[in-house]
Image (tube, rainbow, N blue to C red):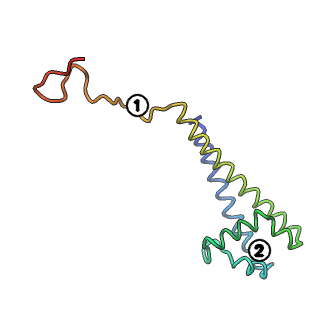
């Protein structure tokens, strides 16, 4: 399972990129085509006015399909696409966590180094014989 990490991380990065650009486009269209709705949401942005309140408000708006009330089929379709990207992002994140958990259960050893400092024939303290077992 550990060999799945690289493709999962690649998918995660790709979804992040698509989500970042899509969110930027979504916010731009919301601001310029539906300014009243954008103001009602607290003027969310990717960089400016990006706080926890506006982020939560935007995620609720997207996840709850608030954009579909605007009666614009093209914007609604793009909002559904963005919602799918966010869902994919969450699923890939959960998959990554599951792979990490199950890959450590398969191989409980953290490292291949021996925990023994010295061989049994050599004493760790100079001049003393090794302990008898």
Q: Earlier in the sequence, mark 1 or mark 2?
A: 2
**In terms of image quadrants, where is residue 48?**
bottom right
Residue farthest along the top direction in this orientation: 133
Q: Quadrant of the N terminus?
A: top right
* Side of 72 relative to 47 (left or right): right
Residue 19, placed above or below residue 75 = above
Q: Which residue is mark 2?
A: 29
Relative vertical location of residue 101 with respect to residue 46 in this rendering, above or below: above
Query: Where does residue 61 sit, x and y in percent of width and height?
Result: 76, 68
| Left or right of 116 on screen, residue 129 | left
Residue 70 picture location, percent across and down: 86, 73
Identify the residue shown where x is 81% and y is 65%: 65
- Residue at 69% x, 69% y is 24
Distance of label 1 from label 2 (alpha carbons): 54 Å
Number of callouts: 2
Tell which residue pokes out farthest to the left in this image.
127
Measuring 74% from the left and 69% from the top, which residue is drawn there?
26
Q: Residues within 10 Å of mark 1 (few under 14, many from 20)?
A: few
Q: Nearer the viewer, residue 32 or 117?
A: 117
Dividing the picture into quarters, in which one does residue 121 lie?
Answer: top left
Say what secondary structure mark 1 lies in.
Answer: loop
In the image, farthest residue toward the front: 133
**Residue named by callout 1:** 112
Residue 47 image label: none
Residue at (60, 73) in percent of width and height: 51
């Amino acid at each position: 399972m550990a060999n799945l990490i690289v493709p999962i991380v690649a998918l995660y990065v790709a979804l992040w990129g698509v989500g970042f650009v899509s969110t930027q486009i979504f916010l731009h269209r919301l601001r310029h085509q539906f300014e009243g709705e954008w103001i009602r949401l607290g003027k969310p942005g990717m960089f400016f006015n990006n706080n926890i309140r506006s982020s939560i408000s935007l995620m609720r708006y997207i996840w709850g399909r608030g954009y579909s009330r605007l009666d614009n089929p093209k914007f609604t379709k793009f909002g559904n696409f963005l919602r799918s990207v966010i869902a994919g992002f969450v699923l890939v994140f959960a998959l990554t966590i599951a792979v990490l958990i199950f890959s450590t259960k398969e191989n409980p050893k953290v490292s291949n180094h021996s925990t023994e400092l010295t061989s049994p024939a050599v004493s760790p303290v100079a001049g003393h014989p090794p302990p008898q077992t």
